[in-house]
Amino acid sequence: MSYSIRQLTGADVTAYRAIRLEALVNHPESYGTSPEAFSARSDATLVTQLTNLTYFGVITDAGELAGIAAFAIDDGERERHRGWVMQVYVTQAMRGTGAALAMLEAVAEHARAHVIQLHLMVGAHNAPAIRLYEKAGFKTYGTDPRCLQVNGRYIDEHMMVRFLDEAPGKTNENV
């Protein structure tokens, strides 16, 4: 299946709402927001979110949004060198196509103009996502125990980082 990657805008709010809700319903243990809380957000709120953060999407040849990833920059004066990758999701049909990795690379390329390192958090139980992030150059630097509580179950999350100012394969002694 072929696809393209592009930055999303406020005009993508309907498609964004649908795919984000799909992610939250199908994988509640992977996100800090519940489907119910997300569903209660107005389109205006989501348009603001799409505008304030930088979102990338996987677009199928049929023009459907089949993947999302958000990029945000820390706003503390001493943390502006760090960015975050959030809300990563691709539909079942797009898994194994390389679309998720391509989307992460689009985020990283965009981030290079703004930060020197990217962070993300991923459920310690989510081996496929961890493999994807490792393939994209992220390395685990710690685990946040009981980071989320979903349906009475605690979820540990691995904290991962990718240093954008280092050559691929180069390691940082502090990780």
Image (tube, rainbow, N blue to C red):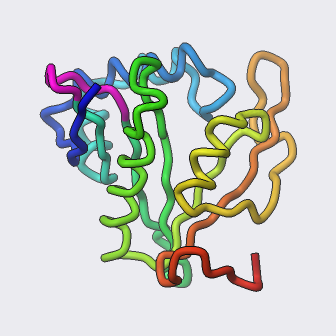
Residue 14 pos. (x, y %): 22, 21
**Residue 90 colored in magenta in the image:** no
Residue 120 occupies quadrant: bottom right
- On the rendered structure, is 117 left or right of 66? right
- On the rendered structure, is 138 left or right of 41? right
- On the rendered structure, is 38 left or right of 30? left
Question: What is the span of residues highlighted in magenta in the rendered image?
Answer: 60-67
Q: In this view, does 108 lie above or below 35?
A: below
Q: In this view, does 23 lie above or below 9?
A: above
**Foreground: 135 or 155?**
135
- Residue at 40% x, 63% y: name it: 108
- Residue at 37% x, 37% y: name it: 68
Residue 114 pos. (x, y %): 35, 75
- Residue at 25% x, 23% y: name it: 15
- Residue at 46% x, 23% y: name it: 38
Residue 23 pos. (x, y %): 49, 22
Q: In which quarter of the image is the N terminus?
A: top left
Q: In which quarter of the image is the C terminus?
A: bottom right
How many marks the image carries: the answer is 0
Residue 110 occupies quadrant: bottom left
Q: Is residue 111 above or below residue 79?
A: above
Residue 2 pos. (x, y %): 24, 31
**Residue 66 colored in magenta in the image:** yes
- On the rendered structure, is 156 left or right of 11? right
Q: Is residue 106 above or below residue 100?
A: below
